[in-house]
Amino acid sequence: MQPRLDRSLTPEKDNSLALCVQNLSFYYGDRKAVEGVSMDIYPGQVTAIIGPSGCGKSTFIKALNRIGELEGNVRVEGQVRFFGQDIYSRRVNLNRLRQQIGMVFQKPNPFPMSIYDNVAYGVRVFSRPSRSTLDEVVETALRGAALWDEVKDNLGKSALGLSGGQQQRLCIARSLSVKPKILLMDEPCSALDPIATMKIEELLHQLREELTIVIVTHNMQQASRVSDYTAFFSTDESRIGQLVEMGSTTNIFTAATNSRTRDYVEGRFG
Ligand code: ADP
């Protein structure tokens, strides 16, 4: 499907946004999971996606680097522009797209190989760097993911021997090694204990200096701690997977316009 170009967009706005999502709907077979979402994602900011279970948060962010298509029989309507580029254009190279818009999942998923090879993996897909260049890339990515000091003497050991929190930071390092512009994170702390969660949250504060981050979280305290903007998704009898309200995190948590957003952030449902 070729999404239509929206002529009403001003090129300046469109090109300067990390992501400009317009009227995005996502279907699994005939079943709609996300309906008509429009959202601007600002560069260098952390945007949190919150909302009750099953309201399409995960589906939505997986549409932002086209990884949702791996589910098979799916259909996407609408438009997603990445710094002005239509990511659903037929000309888009999906490997390159997912290099620039990386993703970290709920459950850490390191490859069954060494710590070093996990981080080097993506770099080797795109180039044939010398060993010294690769060593540098691996070290920088591991430092970027706040894992270097813990693993620098064990780079040849299996990644599967790391703790859950270390594995998740390794997955972040694996994404960082190919220098993405955006990092999509789908509940990255839901499988982690509070200490490991705190480390990831601290890491987000550092990463925001260089990256745009979109994070799905069911933890509202986490959203309020780590994000600049918050988007509230919900589902009701008439509409599936809709964006109810988006704004600065402070506004959403203290002065939301929509009563459903207020009820949710105040813990009255969900
Ligand atoms: P959330 O992340 O908010 O919990 P999801 O995006 O995971 O919500 O799910 C939204 C809806 O899409 C749910 O009804 C879910 O059952 C459905 N869904 C999610 N993944 C699939 C899939 N691979 N195939 C079919 N339906 C799916």
Image (cartoon, grey):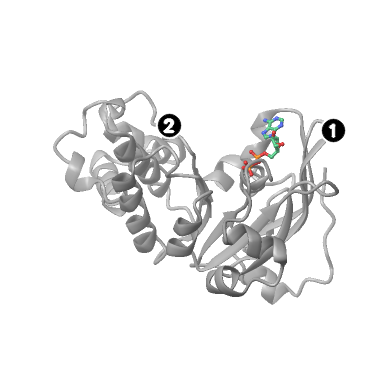
Residue at x 17%, y 33% (from the top left corner)? 154
Query: Which one is earlier in the sequence, the residue at label 1 or at label 2?
Result: 1
Amino acid under label 2?
Answer: Asn
Residue 134 in which image quadrant: top left
Residue at x 35%, y 48% (from the top left corner)? 197
User: Could you tell me which secondary element the residue under label 1 belongs to?
Assistant: loop
- Mark 1 burial class by Cα count in 10 Å: few <14, some 14-19, many 20+: few
Residue 162, position in %: x, y? 27, 32
Residue at x 41%, y 64% (from the top left corner)? 210
* Residue picked out by circle 1: 30
Query: Ligand 1: which quarter?
Result: top right
Residue at x 33%, y 35% (from the top left corner)? 164
Q: Which mark is residue 109?
A: 2
* Left or right: where 22 falls relative to 59: right
* Left or right: where 145 falls relative to 156: right
User: Can residue 123 be seen at all in this image of the molecule?
Assistant: yes
Residue 97, position in %: x, y? 58, 47
* Left or right: where 172 falls relative to 4: left
- Whether the residue under disc 2 has CB within 8 Å of ligand 1: no
User: Can residue 84 be seen at all in this image of the molecule?
Assistant: no
Amino acid under label 1?
Answer: Asp
Is residue 114 placed above or below 165 in the rendered structure? above
